[in-house]
């Protein structure tokens, strides 16, 4: 079973394989997963709503997000709680928030004022990275973790089930200092598999085009949306990471 949706705006800190002690910020509507992808591996299950046109009232307002995060950071300061990152993520795609740029501005100022040693990070599926307002918001984060699970349209569609791969690659290529994150999985029927040689090579070609500052490869750690989805064979993630390094790009493996 997928895990429950995030309760509230702030959650954690979560002990993340990739981000350390990460205090999450959920800017998505309460009780509703909103995403423009429908990834087979999503820990929150299948996407029920991909559009919120005409439903702006469901999104938490930027001033409310700022107030909740401020209170939580002050509480952490009073108790000497260790937090490595303030991470905008949640149960969906955070850059879909109509006021994403304003949220980034508010969190940037808040972090600098209350907790300058904490890194400000964002997790995105990369589909909106070509929009001017999203790019301006992304520029305010110390760390931009951008998703790319495939380098060919067929594999991209089978795993993420939406969007234009070419548009994503072009947008990521023009974003400075990003970390590309890739989830590698397969299923028992062979319908979803980005671990085979052909899709891996296509993905490597896309990564080479983008030239990110770093790449992180990993696999599922929680129950996915698609039953029967499984991790790669032992050593496959290390092999893929070594091929990324051969391109001159640092790469990390998270099991």
Image (tube, grey):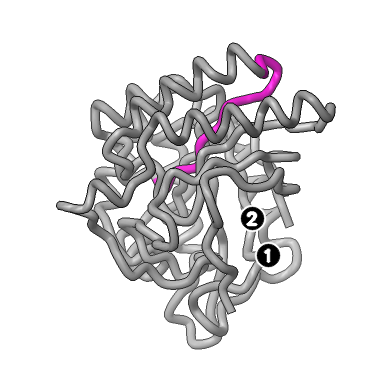
Viewport quadrant of the C terminus: bottom right
Left or right of 199? Residue 181 is right
SS category of the residue bearing label 2:
strand
SS category of the residue bearing label 1:
loop
Q: Is residue 138 above or below residue 26?
A: above
Magenta stretch, residue numbers = 115-125
Q: Nearer the viewer, mark 2 or mark 1?
A: 1
Residue at image location 62% in from the left, 38% down from the top: 246
Q: Position of residue 31 (x, y in %)?
A: 44, 62
Magenta includes 36?
Answer: no
Q: Residues within 10 Å of mark 2 (few under 14, many from 20)?
A: many
For label 2, the residue is 218
Residue at image location 72% in from the left, 30% down from the top: 75
Q: Position of residue 247 (x, y in %)?
A: 56, 35
Q: Is there CB contact under 8 Å for labels 2 and 1? A: yes
Residue at image location 55% in from the left, 56% down from the top: 7
Q: Residues within 10 Å of mark 1 (few under 14, many from 20)?
A: few
Instruction: Report the disc number at residue 221.
Output: 1
């Amino acid at each position: 079973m997928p895990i429950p949706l995030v309760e509230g705006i702030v959650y954690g800190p979560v002990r993340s394989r990739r981000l350390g002690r990460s205090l999450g910020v959920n800017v998505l509507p309460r009780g509703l997963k909103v995403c423009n992808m429908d990834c087979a591996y999503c820990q929150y299950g299948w996407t029920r709503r991909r559009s919120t046109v005409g439903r702006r009232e469901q999104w938490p307002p930027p001033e409310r997000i700022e107030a909740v995060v401020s209170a939580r950071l002050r509480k952490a300061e009073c108790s000497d709680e260790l937090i490595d990152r303030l991470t905008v993520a949640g149960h969906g795609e955070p850059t879909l928030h109509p006021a994403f740029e304003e949220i980034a501005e508010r969190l940037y100022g808040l972090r600098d004022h209350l907790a300058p040693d904490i890194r400000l990070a964002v997790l995105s599926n990369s589909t909106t990275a070509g929009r001017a307002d999203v790019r301006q918001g992304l520029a305010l984060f110390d760390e931009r973790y951008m998703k790319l699970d495939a380098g060919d349209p067929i594999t991209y569609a089978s795993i993420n089930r939406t969007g234009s791969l070419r548009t994503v690659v072009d947008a990521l290529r023009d974003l400075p200092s990003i970390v590309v994150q890739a989830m590698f999985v397969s299923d028992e029927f062979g319908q979803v598999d980005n671990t085979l040689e052909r899709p891996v090579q296509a993905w490597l070609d896309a990564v080479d085009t983008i030239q990110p500052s770093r790449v992180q490869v990993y696999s599922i750690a929680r129950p996915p949306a698609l039953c029967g989805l499984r991790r790669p064979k032992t050593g496959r993630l290390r092999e893929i990471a070594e091929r990324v390094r051969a391109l001159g790009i640092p790469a990390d493996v998270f099991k």
